[in-house]
Every structure is written in structure tokens, then in C-alpha cells.
Image: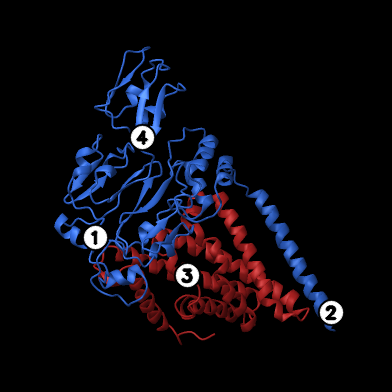
Chain colours: A red, B blue
Amino acid sequence: MHMNEFTQILLLFFSTVLVNNFILVQFLGICPFLGVSKQVGTAFSMGMATTFVMTLTAAATWLINTFILEALNLPFLQYVSFIIVIASLVQFVEMFIKKTSPVLYKALGIYLPLITTNCAILGLALQIPLNNYGFIASVVFGFGAGVGFTLAIVLMAGLRENLEFGDVPSALKGVPITLIIAGLMAMAFMGFSGMISV
Amino acid sequence: MMKSIYLYSLLSMGGLGALLAAGLGFASKAFHVEKDPRIDDVEEALPGANCGACGYAGCSSFAEAVVAGDADIDGCPVGGEEVAKKIAEILDVESSSSEKQVARVLCRGGNKETKKQSKYEGIESCKAADLINASEKSCQYGCLGYGDCADVCPFDAIEMNENGLPEIDPEKCTGCGECVEACPKNIITLYPISKKNHIQCSSPESGSVVTKICEVGCIGCGMCAKVCPVDAITMEGDLAVIDYDKCINCGLCAEKCPTNTIEFEGKKVKNIEITENCVGCTLCAKACPVDAIEGEPKEQHEIDPEICVKCGICYDTCNVEGAIKVEYE
């Protein structure tokens, strides 16, 4: 029984990372996916920051949803409360990074505060009550979403770094080829669908 | 029941907001990063329009770049000299003479002065007309007259006049360069506002071609280049081009130009002489671009009328009241 629960959690994690990847399958968070995927290093840092915010968001929104919104029967306040929580968390992460790593702060630039408006985060927060996850499952779901985000953005950055040396037809240079690659990656990730069903 | 929903909503969201605000307030103290106080000072001195004309994302990133030494103190085209001076004061550096730049269209051929070869009935935009190579005027280099520059100007400094040419108000122009970018014919240039001579033609065609299609086009006679006392004008093929850095605003080129292509905006000096008030400081002799002034130190200087080009620079440099007498036309 105990083992079974653990397997469930593990399955949830992998299904979030691969099968229901936030970027490539659900098409959430495309803005930073295209904006910060020029270098693998920066992309990875962005992924880490997003993972951090997503994990905390999952925990915080589960608590708020369960103990405030559901307890007081106020489900219509989900959007409002989740947005405040996400905005505050991002502010906090921004201050934290600014203090601890000015270099990273510069590299992430405008995309760091823009995590606030990253629809992947709000999407995550709204999916938790929809799926009726418990606390642990919510945190794993949030963490898995972040890992999936990091995976997608780092893969994209790796491809784009190599693309710099590629012989791209001039009409496709820049954004067009990036969007084509994103589409191909999305198709590849859709190959995972049906592999795990939770 | 309804009342309690309002009450609970207000209390829960208010409480949540207050809690997060307190947390963030605490975090901002705990994670406070000391930054150069001059950045805030510089930002305050800037106009705060966040227009991006400096090439940075906004006034605050420009302020950071200035303090870091990555941007010039006169990098704000909107604030101009005034702001550059303030920034220089804050950073305690010399303000390099950052003269205000303004835009000018290098074409004088409006509807009256030019011949037409076709009728364009497409979209009323220079860019669109240029894409299909449709110039109503026979001149392929001149102003198209659909006012892309006037449309793009963020400061309303450009208006199209009745003659179909843009008129730029140097008072309103900030030298941001938007119109320079927008002009598909590339005939708008930025020049320092103190400069008064402008060769307003961009056609490199030979004189025989230009005379047929435009009354005010440069025919490449080279008179201006010959008469210029400081060699500020060079002939690039059949087009005269002025180097604003060298120009001394004497207006001789405009006087000589047979086609009236060159505009002189300054006041033309009619007569200039040094009076007995001269103390012989030699400043004027040093400033004279054509070495027309001679005289021993501490004695009254004299202007050689043969050499003098009546640019008035000596009058501007002289520090002694009444030492140089000037009459304008």
C-alpha cells in the first residue's frame, strides 16, 4: 500500500515532466520558452527560477485553496488569490536572486519579473484544484511542471546554440526557424502521450 | 448567507494580501542590495519619458549605463544639453559640448520645383511607394512627399507643407532620429543646431539630368566647394556634400549656389571691423578660420578685407565690449 502511493507519486512526476509537459504539450509559458532560450546556461537558470516558483506556488495555492477558499466556500476567488500569491513569490525570488547572484539577475533580465505573467504558473495553480491533488501530490506536480519546463527550455537552447552555425535559409532566420523547431519538438513530445495515465 | 460571502471574501483576500505584503516588506529589508546612489540621482535628472531614444530600455536602465560608464552623459536626445549638464554635475565629469542635433530633409524639390513623370495612386505612404519604385517626381532621389517622417515623429515636430515637403520645427525636434530611420529615400540627416548652411539635395545625377527635372537640385558645378574658405564642402561625383564639423557658418556657399540648392539660415554679415577698443588679446586672430586678422599682442588688430569671409566668428569670440563692430544685412 505504502509502495503503491510512492509509485503513484513517481508516475505523477514523470507524467507531468514528459506526457503533460507544460510547454510542449499544453503550450503554456511560450514567452520565456522563446525569449530566454538563446544560451543553455541562462535557459537552465531560468528553468531553475521557474521550478522554484512553481513548486512554492503549488504548495501555497493548495494551502490557500483548501484552507481558505474551500473552507469558506469561495471558489470564485481562485484567480484573484492565486495571482497575488504568484506575484508575491516572483517578487521574493527576484529579491533573492538580486541579492545572491547579481550575474544571474542580469542574465535573466526582464524575464525574471515576467515569470509573474507566465501562464504556465497560473495554469499550474488552476489545475491543482481541478485534479483534486493532495498536498504532496500538488508539490510533486508543481516540481514536475518546473522540471518539464526546464527540460524543454534547455533542449531548445541547445538546439538554438547549434543553429547559430547552421546554414538556415535567410527567409527562415531568427524567429521563423525557432517556431518551426518548437513545433517539431512539440510533435516529438506528443509521442509520449498515452505512455502513463494517472 | 450573502452577507457572509462578502465578509469572508473581503477578510480572506485582505488578510492574504496583508500577510504577503508584510512578508515582502520584510524580504526587501533582508535582501536589500546597496546600489550606487548616483543612479537614482541621474534617473531623477532625466526627462522620465522612457521613450528609448537613447537605445536603452528606459530612463532607469540608461541611468545605470551612464553611471557604469557604458553610455555617454549626453546620450539622452530628449533631455539634450540641459540634462547632460545635470548628469555631468552628478557624476562630477566635464560635460562634453553636447550640442542639440536636429533633423533636416536634404531635398528642396517640392511640387512646384520638380517635374512629374507619373501618377501614384497607391497607399499614401513613402515606404509603400518606394517598395514599388513609384516616384511621382522625375527625380529618383528626392522626397516622395507622403509624410512618413511626419507620421513617425514622436514630438510632432514635422509637418508637411503645401508644397509637399516636410517642414521640421527645430524647436520641437529632439534629434531622436526616428524620421531618419523612417525615410525610405534616406534623405533626412541630423545636424548640430548651430550650423546654418545646408546643401539640400541628394541627387548624384549629373547637372544636365538635374536641370531638366528639378529647379533647385544640385547640378554639381562645384562653386560652393571652391568658395568655401575652410574646405568643408566636397564634391562626391556631381553632388556637393557639407561636413558640418568644419563649416563656419559664413554663408558664402549659399551666396554662390546658382540653383539655390544651399540654404543659409544665419544672419549675413555685411560689414565687420575692429575698433580702437581692441586690447590686443589675439583671441580673434587665433579664432579666424581664414587667418584674415593680424596684429601684435596688446595692440589693435586689423582685419584684411581681401581675405575676410565675413563669418563673424571673431565677433563671437571677442571678450571686449565694442572692440569689434559688426553690421548685418
- Mark 2 residue type: Ser
Q: Nearer the viewer, mark 4 or mark 3?
A: 4
> Percent x, y for residue A124?
58, 75
Q: Which residue is denoted by mark 4 in the rendering?
A: B269
Chain letter belonging to callout 1: B
Q: Nearer the viewer, residue B99 or A36?
A: B99
Q: Can residue A101 be spotted in the picture?
A: no
Q: Which image quarter is the N terminus of chain B in?
A: bottom right
Chain letter belonging to callout 4: B
Give the CA separation, mark 4 to mark 2. Answer: 86 Å
Which circle marks residue B1 in the picture? none
- Mark 4 residue type: Val
Q: Is residue A19 above or below residue B128?
A: below
Disc 1 crowd, CA 10 A, few/some/many (<14, 14-19, 20+): many
Q: Which residue is denoted by mark 3 in the rendering?
A: A31
Q: Which residue is denoted by mark 1 in the rendering?
A: B214
- Mark 1 residue type: Cys
